[in-house]
Structures are given as structure tokens and as C-alpha cells.
Image (tube, rainbow, N blue to C red):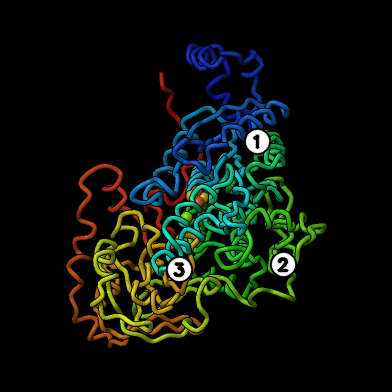
Amino acid sequence: MSQRRSAQWYAGTDRNAYIHRAWMRRGLPSDAFDGRPHIAIANTASDLTPCNRHLTEVAASVAQGVYAAGGIPLELPVVSLGETLVRPTAMLWRNMAAMATEEMLRANPVDGVVLLGGCDKTIPSLLMAAASVDLPALVVPGGPMLTGTFRGVPLGCGTDVWRLSEEVRAGTLSEEQFLRSESSMIRSRGHCNTMGTASTMAMVAEALGATIPGTAGTPAPDSRLLEGSHEAGRLAVEMVHADRRPSGLFTRASFLNAVVALAAVGGSTNAVVHLLAIAGRLGVELTQDDFDATGAGVPLLVDLQPAGRYLMEDLHRAGGLLAVLRQVEDLLDDEALTVTGRPLTSYLADAEIWDREVIRPRDEPLQASAGIVVLHGNLAPDGAVIKPAAATPALLHHRGRAVVFDSIEDLHARIDDPDLDVDADSVLVLRGCGPRGYPGMPEVANLPLPTKLLEAGVRDMVRICDGRMSGTAYGTVVLHVAPEAAAGGPLGLLRTGDVVVLDVAHRRLDVELTPDELASREPAPAMVEAFAAPRRGWEQLYVRTVMQADTGADLDFLVGSSGSEVSRESH
Ligand code: FES
Ligand code: MG
């Protein structure tokens, strides 16, 4: 590189260089502007994103590392999305966060960036941004919370909220006990400690090569998080010197490594949408079907909630992601590089399993093939996904009558109606919840079971939705149905009483209707109206331009990269 990117702002003796330097001096010495790397620390810390609140302390360690390596650290607060509070769903804002971060990195005099994320959408949006601006970038995952316990039993955040609230509805737990568990669930700083979306995206980022290998999954309060953060700051400076950028690092092989990791850890279905969106920014060819082709046969090796028993602190103690990956090393591509410049597989030689209950060796898997399965059929021409590891095996081949709900409001109004014609074999369908229909594609696919069936002891039913499911949830849930009902998908033509067939072994999701019968039907009126509502602002832009789940639900005009060049001066 002939000239450092930041030097386009700071080098020289003209008026503009004067302005750029003068306002930035505030404590920086003159040699700050001598061409050394300026490193942005994209920080998603926010009081309203409790999972990421501690990232300001992480940023301080990153900054020390940047200084230590001869760079200049610059904290850049970016849009922060907290899963628990943001309405109507944090996913509505993922692409906005990605766009805003991309533009601010491009607009400012920075040469590289350290990405600080944690809560579900933050690592995806940061990686999408870094991919599109294509500056040297690495992720520091903020890390999971420590394990909280209630009445002597560990609580998995997220997963146990669903479980305990169902127990209240089933009458097996008092409301008072339920409320008492509330203060035990969130024991420390950090993100959800189950293998939910936040933990999954940290694992997947590491498998992709975007973190310092061995750092993802370090609990947020653990001293090693700050040690790794310091190292990340140093590495960012090295990456600028080496011009090690996302476009050169993250190849199809890197993404397929991430798909293998996703399956081996039993990660969240949300990772499918996020990885597709990140790949789309890089122009890497990755399809939803790749998740099935590469991931479905991968053994489940990690016994974490929601599919299993343990929590992220246990995974870290047991050896972490590298110990898992060593077990499936033959499925990984040794060419795929990490941000350190070394291949991911070069870090696996001494990755031991320290607790074989938490991380299973390859020959004793929890399930022989556990990755996400992609279904096709006349209900999902562009595909739908299911996570068999979180489902009831007996329901993976099922034929039942549909009970159709047109919106989340319709569901809430009718699901507990004692007169609702539903039994344990029914297939519950919730539509109007895709990227356009709900705008944002909320995590509602694991719809609650009817109370009368819960009281009768039913704990799982086949559910089908064009929305997403929380990574901390479980059940026999078919999700991400594409095209969604509000985009004209056949899910919008389904009627209560139609017979639906789920056949996971054969990758099928069908309604027993002929093509002529389907073609003769009008979409349910609610589907036509679903995306007519937004009149202005982001929501309107989103509904007009969002793509379907099977291609990552990015906005169509954000696919690809614009690089880091800005030709015009501001003064
Ligand atoms: Fe932030 Fe679960 S709510 S990771
Ligand atoms: Mg979530």
C-alpha cells in the first residue's frame, strides 16, 4: 500500500490536513499522525443492551493493545441491538446497524477495526459492515454470562424462561416461584449462556476465522477476556501492516468451516440467516442448501442447552470451540485462514477435551448427525429449516391437520380458546411473520402450545412458521419458510384443516393439495395487508427492499461491498 488510508486525512501541510489533525490532537502526540495505523474500536456497549454493557471495559484493553503495537485506538460507538428490549424485533434493525457501521467506518479516517459484539445481532451486523467496507477487521466476542442457579439447579438464560413459563401455564410451578427465579437467571455481565444465537455467533465467528482462535466463549467476567482483548488490539495493528482484509480472508472454505462448527456445537438456526447475509456482503457463494449438504451429517458434540444440559461456562472449562473442532478436523478445510494469518486448523493440535460430558469425543457423539436440515416442498419452494437436535424425534416424520394463525395477535387471541379444534397431532402454523410480513422476522416460530394440551401432558407439536426462533428455544419447529406468506409464498394459501406432511428424512414439507388446488386459492386477506402498513422511515425502506430468509434477509441494495474509498473531501 503506497499510503495509509488515514494519511489521506492527516498527511500534508494544507488546510484540510490541518483541520483533521487539529481537532484530533486532544492528548494525541504529533507522531500520532506520522502514518501509524489508526484503529477503530466499534463498540456496541449500551445501557439498553445489557449483554454488551461491559464492552467499554473491553474497549479499554483493546486500546492498550493498539497503543502497545504502535497504533492509535479510536473508540467508535455504533448502533447497538439488545435482544430483550428492542421492539418489534432486533432483527428489523440488524441491517440498519450493519449499514450505519459500514458507512461510519468508511466515512472516518481509520485503517482497521476491532469489532466488539455479544448480544445476538451485534456480531452479525458488525461482520456485515466490516465485509462491505473491507478494512482489516477482527471480532472480540464479549462472552457469555456465568452460570446462575435457582434452588440448587443451574438456570440457562433464555431456555429456562421458556421452560419455566410453560410450567406455570401447565400448573406445575407457582407464579411466585417463577418470579423468584428472575434475579437468579442473569448472574453476571455477558450475553446469554446457553447455545443461543449470541453464543452461536461467537462460535461461528471463530470458526470463520474472524476472532483470535481460542477466544470465543471466554466468559465475560473472566480475566482472559481482557487478555485476549489486549492481544486483539495488537493484532489489529499487525493486520493493517499486512493488509489482511475480509475479502482476502473469508472464502467459501471459511464459511463451510463455520457451517461444520455450527452443527457440531448444536448452534442456533439464526446463524443460517446471518452467515448467508455476511457471505452476501463478500460475494462468497453460499446457499441455504449448503447448511444441509455440509452440516446435516456433522455429529453433535456439545451438550449445551437448549438441546442439552450444560452452559457456556462449562464449554469453556471443557476446552472450548477448538477442542470441539479438533474432533471434526477431517471435515474442516485447512486452507481457510484466520485473522492471525494462520489457518484455523493450525490451532487444533493441542486442543484437549477436559470434560467429556460437556464436549463429546467424535466416536461418542450426542447425535450422529445433528446439523440444520433444509426442507423443500409445495409449502416452501425456496426452502425452510429445522433443527432436528432441538426437536422430538418421533415428530420428525409427521402428518397432521393444520391449525392456521394469520398473525401473532391472532395466535394470542385463539390459542387458549377451549373451543379451538386442535389435538396433539395437529400442525400449528403461524404465518405473516417473515421479513416483510411482520417487518423484521421476529422470533415467534416456537409458538406456545394450547394450554389444554399442555395440561394433558403434551410437550411438543409440529409447528411451522415463516419467522425465526430464538436460539435458546427448542421444539419440532419448521422455520424461515420461504417465500414468506406476505411475499406471496404458498404458506399464505394454507387453510385450517389442510393436511400437512413433514418428512425430515426426505427433506420435505408439503400440504396434500394438487398444484391446481393450490393455484386456485386466493391468499388469505391478512397476508395481502401484512406489509402495506409502513409509511415512512426505516421500516418502509426495509419492507420495500428486504430479501427472503433463504438469502440472508439483507436489504437487496446492501449485498456486496463498496470498499473503503471515499473520493470527496468534506471541506
Ligand atoms: Fe442478549 Fe440473549 S439477550 S444474548
Ligand atoms: Mg435470541
Q: Foreground residue, 481 or 219?
A: 219
Upstream in the sequence, badge 3 or badge 1? Answer: 3
Query: What residue is shown at x 20% (from left), y 65% (from top)?
Result: 526
Task: Say what amino acid the circle numbered 3 marks.
Answer: Thr
Residue 245 visible in the shown view:
no
**53 vs 294: above or below:** above
Residue under label 3: 172
Residue 50 % position (x, y): 49, 41
Q: Nearer the viewer, mark 2 or mark 3?
A: 3
Residue under label 1: 240
Do labels 3 and 1 touch, CB within 8 Å? no
Q: Tell me how far mark 3 sits from mark 1, CA to CA.
A: 58 Å
Q: Does the beta carbon at disc 1 come under 8 Å from ligand 1? A: no
Query: What residue is shown at x 28% (from left), y 66% (from top)?
Result: 411
Residue under label 2: 357
Task: Say what amino acid the circle numbered 1 marks.
Answer: Val
Residue 223 visible in the shown view:
yes
Q: Does the beta carbon at disc 3 come under 8 Å from ligand 1? A: no
